[in-house]
Image (cartoon, grey):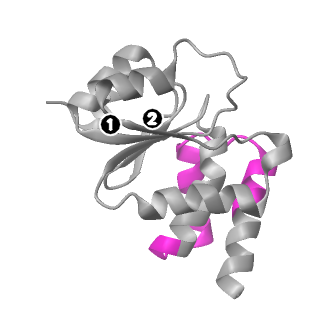
Amino acid sequence: MPTPLEALAGVANAAQPLPGLVTGGQPTEAHFKALKEAGVELILDIRDPMEPRPFDEPALAAKLGMEYVNVPVHGGTLTDETIEKILAILRGRGARSTLFHCASGNRVAGPMIAHLILDHGVSEEEAVQMGMRIGLRGAEILQWGTDYAARKKGA
């Protein structure tokens, strides 16, 4: 049986920033099947439903017995409300092995930076470095995650 990270072989920016949590870009149907075999139970997809996709993720996840959650992230949704929805899912996943993805890993990085800082005691510098490893490429996404974490950490 592959590990969840091994199941993502070939996916852009595939990484395992935390135990039981893998991240990356857009997986294929074969990746979903390998993820199921690797014990992944939850798919957190932050792509907008209108983005072109190679297959119907919600239908395949349901067929495989995996929970599928979509929280759309695009320029107009880089808000506290959106990041809080994502963090609630990450915090509430318990021991369930999870894939957290977008198209490339870039959008995943913002909420992951906040999650690492706020929930795992990682320094901002280390969290940003991890964000880069999981696909961070945009200054706007970086600022979204770090600003949210700074506001909440100081609260």
Label 1 residue SS:
helix
Quadrant of the image occupied by residue 59: top left
Residue 56 position in % (x across, y down): 52, 17
Q: Could one spot residue 115 in this view of the protein?
A: yes
Between disc 2 and disc 1, whose residue precedes? Answer: 1
Give the Cα distance between marks 2 and 1. 7 Å
Find disc 1 in the rendering and name its residue: 5
The label on residue 122 is none
Label 1 sits on what residue type?
Leu
Q: Is residue 148 above or below residue 13?
A: below
- Image position of 72 (left or right of 55): right
Say whether marks 2 and 1 touch (CB < 8 Å). Answer: yes
Checking the image for residue 14, the label placed there is 2
User: Which of 100 and 88 lies nearest the eye of the viewer?
Assistant: 88
Q: In the displayed image of the protein, which residue is found farthest to the right?
A: 76
User: Magenta residues, as a range?
Assistant: 119-145
In the drawing, does residue 1 fall left or right of residue 82? left
